[in-house]
Image (cartoon, rainbow, N blue to C red):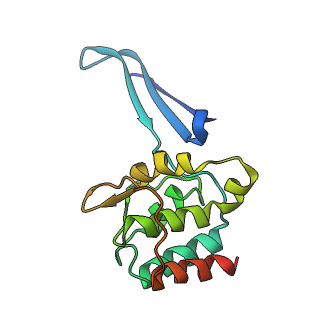
Amino acid sequence: MEEIFLRLAEMSQRTQGGLFINQVNIVVENKGTVNNKTSETVSKERHAHFPPCIDENRGIALHRFLIQQGMIGANSDEASFLYLMGIVTCQPKDLRLIEWVANKQLLREMLEGAVRPLLEDGNFKKADIERLAPLCFTQGGKPLNLAKSKPVPSIDSDALENFFATW
């Protein structure tokens, strides 16, 4: 019987611009041959996500709030949301990007509210939000690129502001 050794290496790093990338490399080494191969390498990168800033209870509350307000789809996966927002570090097996239903300005306001402490500390910039948004959010099944900030008074905008004011 052939011996198979599994080596798992995980690396986490913060890249320039505040993006967090976790990489998992799974290498299967085989003494002998399988399908005429002496070794097989499977590499899987974890999906980019926002930096940790919110505790899990607040993250769950934010997810529920966004569903109740109709800003994300009612079938939005909580585990995926928590991972993409940087609230939990374990990537769900079936990661689904967040389908944003509301307008792009509300997404910008939500993200700025969620990472406000990092923005205030200077550890994260609004440009970082713009780079990460299309990696974590979709609209109409396509990556969502944020528009320029154009605050427009609205009931939804006020609801977001009031939600974050309770933190």
**How far from the left and from the top, in percent, is residue 1?**
38, 23
Q: Looking at the image, which residue is at 41% across and 30% down?
A: 43
Q: Looking at the image, which residue is at 61% across and 51% down?
A: 51
**How far from the left and from the top, in percent, is residue 53?**
67, 59
**How far from the left and from the top, in percent, is residue 96?**
37, 58
**How far from the left and from the top, in percent, is residue 102?**
36, 72
Residue 143, placed above or below residue 163: above
Asked whether the viewer can see residue 97, the reply is yes
Asked whether the viewer can see residue 96, the reply is no
Q: Looking at the image, which residue is at 25% across and 58% down?
A: 141
Residue 109, placed above or below residue 130: below
Observer-nearest of 151 and 33? 151
Image quarter of residue 160: bottom right
Q: The C terminus is located in which quarter? A: bottom right
Q: Looking at the image, which residue is at 61% across and 83% down?
A: 162
Give the side of residue 65 with respect to residue 40, left or right.
right
Tally of numbered discs? 0
Image quarter of residue 57: bottom right
Observer-nearest of 121 and 80? 121
Residue 97, placed above or below residue 77: above
Give the side of residue 145 with respect to residue 6, left or right.
left
